[in-house]
Each structure stands twice: as structure tokens, then as C-alpha cells.
Image (spheres, rainbow, N blue to C red):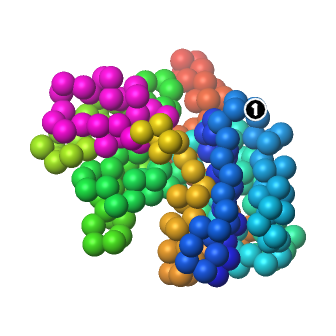
Amino acid sequence: MKIFVLDTSSKAASAAVWEDGHLLADCWQNTGRTHSVTSLPMAENLLADCSRTLEEMDALAVTAGPGSFTGLRIGMAMIKGMGFALGKPCIPLSTLEGLAWNLRGWPGLICPVMDARVGQVYTALFRWENGKMHRLMDDCAIAADELREHLAEYGAEPKILVGDGAMLCYNKFEGQLENLSMAPDHLLHQRAGAMAELAASLLAEGKTVSAGELAPVYLRLPQAERELKLRQQKGE
């Protein structure tokens, strides 16, 4: 089983190749350069370096959201184009679940959190038990204070924050929640290498879509649509 994985959902960009039960190669960078410039060369170089081709892949995986609207569209466009051209099945990945896989094996509550701006965070809750990642809360966009309330329900259970919103929430929640910690920097951001095992498990379960069916999951309206809706409401 061979899978190519791409993530462009936030500031960092990464790509990986999963082969026969293990991570064969991955590449990650957080340079701030636009994904439209870096992602395709990254993918090409990664495949060349491990002597693999897209034609060999059994499936193509990509983070579908939530995340940066522009970033998600860049990754989607790449994988949809590759999928159409090669007739490959595609695997849409939850960005938040992919972040949770950075902490695979961690004994406690795993809380991926991404800064969604306008006073909100994208978040979900997971727990690793018996060799599997278990989802405890659906992906959602909520206020940070609402997330604190959800975490408080788990009492003294260890809780770890991961994602680009982790520092924001850790500083806000510190002293208000028991056993709260933050992932170390090398595990803090989305990584295609960690998501590769998630993609492999989804492929094994037959959870793929065609390139035409692949679509981003934004969780809320784009900024332009939100502003238009607000203007329309004020005009009523």
C-alpha cells in the first residue's frame, strides 16, 4: 500500500509517502512562503528523493479542513488535479484529527486547536486508547471560552493542546484547568508524516472519494461571504 499525503492547511506545508505499513519519506517547512510556490516543488522533490512516482500510489490524501481557506484550496487543487489525471482514489483528512495523530500514544486528552480568528478556534477532542485514536468531539468552530468549558468537564485528566492555536489557549487557560500542557514545538504543527498513518487506516476501511467528490471543509463561511451577509442583515 502506497499513499501520497499533502498538507497545506496552515502556514506550514508538508508532504509524505506512506508505504507498506511505515513512513517512507516526509518533508516539512514553515518558512512563510506561499503554498502555491512551495508545494508542487516539495512534492516533486520528495517523490524523486525516495525514487517513487505518483503513478505508483494507491491513493492520494490531503487535509480537507478546517484551516486557511486559501491554503486548503491550494492543496485541494493539487490533489484533485493529480487524482483526475491518474484516476487515483482520494482520501480527505480532517486537519484536526491529523494534528491529534502528532501525539499518537499520548496518555490523556488530546485537544487540537487552530486559530480561526474573529475570537474563535477550530477544535475537536481525541483520546488514544488500545492502539486507536478515538474521537470525543466533532470538528467545530467555537469561542475559546467555550472550549475551556468542554475541557473542564474532564477534571484532572491530563490535557494537551496541539496546533497553531495552542499557545493562545494555553496562555488563556493556564491556572483555570488541571493538568494542562502544550505539545513541544516539533509536534505543534500539522505534519503530513503523522497524517500518513491516519490516511492508511482510512484507506484500509475503504473511506476514499473520487477526485470529483473531493471538497474542502471550511466549518464556516469565507470572510467575504460573512461580510456580505452582515451587510445584508444591516440593510434589512
Residue at (36%, 65%) from the top-left corner? 133
Image: 185 above or below 196:
above
Disc 1 is placed on an element classified as: loop
Whether residue 213 is visible, yes or no, is no
Q: Residue furthest top?
A: 234
Residue lying at the far right in this picture: please name it.
85
In magenta segment, residue 128: no
- Is residue 169 highlighted in magenta? yes
Q: Which residue is mark 1?
A: 33
State the residue at coordinates (65%, 68%): 24
Q: Which residues are magenta?
A: 160-183
Farthest left residue? 156
> In the image, 140: left or right of 35?
left
Q: Position of residue 58 (x, y in %)?
A: 70, 79
Question: Looking at the rendering, in which quadrant would you find the N terminus?
Answer: bottom right
The image shows residue 109, relative to residue 213, as above or below, that is above
Q: Residues within 10 Å of mark 1 (few under 14, many from 20)?
A: few
Residue 54 spot, x, y in % from top left: 81, 70
Left or right relative to 68: residue 188: left
Question: Residue at the location (60% across, 55% down)?
Answer: 192
